[in-house]
Image (cartoon, rainbow, N blue to C red):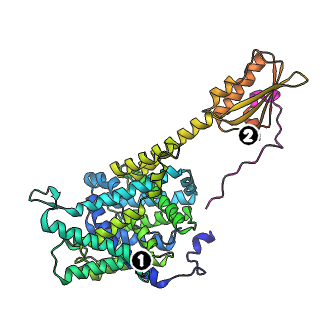
Amino acid sequence: MNQYVNLFDFKQRVDYKNEILSGLTVALALIPEAVAFALIAGLSPLTGLYAAFVMGLVTAVLGGRPGMISGATGAVAVVIVALVKSHGVEYIFATVVLAGLIQILAGVFRLGKFIRLVPHPVMFGFVNGLAIVIFLSQMDQFKVADATGTLYWMTGPPLFMLLGLVALTMLIIWGLPRLTKAVPASLVAIITVSLLTIGLNIDTRTVGDIASIQGGFPPFHIPAVPFTLETLSIIFPYALIVAGVGLIESLLTLNLIDEITQTRGRGNKECVAQGLANVTSGFLSGMGGCAMIGQSLINISSGARARLSGIVASVMLLFFIIVGAPIIEKLPMAALTGVMIMVAIGTFEWASLKTFGKMPWHDVLVMVLVAGITVLFHNLALAVLIGVIISALVFAWENARRIRARKYVDEAGAKHYELYGPLFFGSVMAFREKFDVAGDPNEVIVDFKDSRVADMSGIEALSKLTSSYQQAGKTIHLKHLSPDCRRLLANAEKLIDVNILEDPDYRVLADD
């Protein structure tokens, strides 16, 4: 309980300048993203901005990963867009609240540890796919709509002007850290390009051209839906998907930041924080969300490591909504586009390209497949789930081939089978083929010292094996079986010679 109450590590050295400037940079980058995701979901821009403020603030204060940024995300927007069209915005608020409750339960029951089951190739695929998605999402800024609303690529001077401003932004972000790291390069780039466009009166698309961000403090609002089982049946499937997508994306982002900062976040604590944030967002007219890998990387690359940056980002975002909207709406989209393209370049795991031809083919396949699904369907949860399933099947197949037996007959005439490798559903067939029931002597000893019965299929295989020897009038001794196997093999209890003293004690890793 103490880890949930002790929110701030006062022993941590905090660079207040970096934290505040990083938070300001993130706040500026959050605006177009939140607006865009709200529009994708068919909601008003303020619904996305309110979600970004609430999600960012709650997770910054209560989350398990200082420095990570949460807000309205495309993964959640894609899930809820169908519900918006069929039932309206009030059902979205109810769905977000229910999704938050599910996430809180996931944290309370310490399910965050299952993110450890995600293999490294899946992580590579997830990160690379997300980098490509971030990059491709910026391409819309290079398109304009005609009278019918159809988008087509810019041409002529407007395109060259936009390319020039984006290139200038990227150049500043790339070059400034080589001169000084006193201020975040992304913030300097945004301010420089903004002053340039405003001062020279350059005609280019601004934040205000997308939508107005003017508003007030998020209003408290109980979702206006019937509190009936029918409503629950409508929103529960969406809530379950939103909760799952949110937790997967948040925990994978947490792991990524852990690797970058060489520290360790708390997965279960983050699950609870994400849940509380979504519940709060649903009651404050927000669309909900989860961790944002792009903004998180902007924050971390700007030098932020503490909770203060996330708090500043959220408070500044609210300040922009209430007070600074007229100024923020003048920011050129070119500057924010340049920032996000640099984020995409920095997010992509370029080292993963070196694995081709050097790593096992199935790992490369999983990495490419996860990246491809992420890009094509924009569904991170589906991509990760498919990657984990394929990796698990490959692992099962590889281990099924590894079970083997050393056979010999001792001086007393008893035949020994010393097993190596795990006995589970995948290796049951190979296990049965090792034994010659008809040709073996009257006494057989099967030694599991270097093997492990992993599941019920293995238990059933042992039960059938002992029954086969019993029907042949022969005695079989199973040595070095674990206590759980001994209890489950009740039917063969009289035939089993169990040595539990030498069996290792298997324990689950400690929860975080």
Q: Amino acid at mark 2?
A: Asp
The residue that label 1 is drawn on is 177
- Residue 236 image point, x, y percent: 40, 51
In the displayed structure, 480 sits above or below 375; it is above
Mark 1 surroundings: few (<14), some (14-19) or many (≥20) residues within 10 A:
some
Query: Does residue 40 lie above or below 404 as drawn?
Result: below
Q: Is residue 225 visible?
A: no
In the picture, measured across the screen, residue 90 lies left or right of residue 505, that is: left
Would residue 103 be seen by someone viewing this image from the given angle?
Answer: yes
| Residue name at image x 48 percent, y 45 percent | 357
Rendered location of residue 280, percent (x, y): 42, 68
The vertical placement of 165 against 404, above or below, is below
Magenta stretch, main secondary structure class: loop
Element type at mark 1: helix
Residue 204: x and y, percent? 18, 72
Q: Identify which residue, 345 or 79, lies in the foreground.
A: 345
Mark toward the start of the polypeptide (2 vs 1): 1
Look at 52% across and 46% down and name the residue there.
359
* Mark seen at residue 484: 2
What are the residue bounds of the magenta stretch?
490-512
Does the magenta run of residues contain 115?
A: no
- Give, as a three-letter code, the residue at label 1: Pro
Which residue occupies 72% across, 22% down?
435
Mark pair 2, 1: CA separation: 59 Å
Nearer the camera: disc 2 or disc 1:
1
State whether residue 15 is above or below residue 508. Answer: below
